[in-house]
Amino acid sequence: MTIRPAATPLTDESDLVARARGNDRAAVRTIIRQNNRRLFRVARSILKNDWEAEDAVQEAYVRAFAHLSEFEGKSSLNTWLTRIVVNEALGRLRRRKPTVDIAELEAGQVDAEGADIVPFPLTSVQPDPERSMAQAQIRNLLEDAIDALPDPFRVVLVARVIEEMSVEETAELYGLKPETVKTRLHRARAMLRRDLEEQFGPLLADTYPFGGRRCERMADNVIARLDAAR
């Protein structure tokens, strides 16, 4: 069965889910566009590798759309998808180190690995090579500093500061107590050099971007795989 185009405009989440269950291509693409950035950032905070995180998100989408009938609406679709991505990312860590699980991540026992920091494209109405270079260097410094954090502190920082999840949502996502989330966020901030945070803090929201052609490629790949499976 091929995913069909939407006949009418997409509206709220329940409508999106219903249409996606009915193989509505536009609904599937809209869900992907709405969730790409958060899912990518969460996956990358666990895997510390840009391209593996992207692949993990794609696999999570395919699994989620194949089991969309199991989504009961008890949490938001975003939360449901995020849990699937976390499980996919942790599964990849287990393949690197068979004993890794959420408890080890929570306890900070996962081995740190060097991450490939990939410079992301910058957009500007009037390109300024010097400004673009400076921005890329700043972004790389931020990403290096975040990647250097121990696993349990990095995932909380990404969830709370970069992706702006609530304490409760972060706690539920990683199986932590809210007090633990608060403590780890405090310690994560302290681990980042104070001057780095003061100078570049406002740019945190721009790290690990996932939009434009990469966003559309993700949607195209997921839809193509869903079409092939039907």
Image: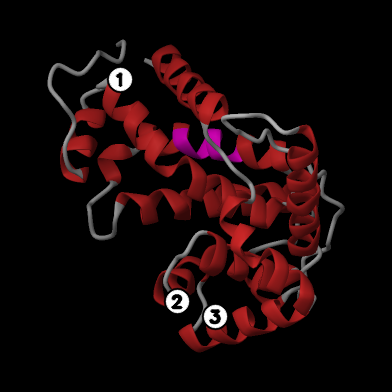
Q: Is residue 131 left or right of residue 224?
A: right
Q: Is residue 32 above or below residue 91?
A: above
Mark 2 is on which residue type? Val
Residue at mark 2: 167
Task: Give how far apart the Cα atoms at labels 1 and 2 are.
Answer: 34 Å
Report x, y in % for residue 157: 61, 69
Q: What label sits on residue 25 in the rendered view?
A: 1
Secondary structure state at the residue bearing disc 3:
helix
Q: Is residue 143 left or right of residue 114?
A: left
Residue at coordinates 63% horizontally, 54% vertically from top-left?
90
- Crowding around mark 3 (Cα neighbors within 10 Å: few <14, some 14 to 19, many 20+) is many
Q: How far is the residue under mark 1 from the one under mark 3?
A: 38 Å
Reading the image, the residue beneath label 3 is: 181
Q: Quick check: marks 2 and 3 in contact, CB under 8 Å?
A: yes
x and y percent of residue 128 in the render? 72, 33
* Quadrant for the N terminus in the image: top left
Q: The residue under label 3 is which amino acid type?
A: Val
Residue positioned 71% across, 68% down in the render: 199
Front residue of 131 and 18: 131
Q: Farthest residue toward the right?
A: 114
Residue at the image point whose x is 40% and y is 14% from the top: 227
Q: Which residues, given as a range, are shown in magenta?
A: 56-61
Give residue 223's position: percent from left, percent from top.
Answer: 42, 20
Q: Tag 2's secondary structure?
A: helix
Question: Which circle's residue, 2 or 3, is located before the other in the chain?
Answer: 2
Closest to the observer, 182 or 134: 134
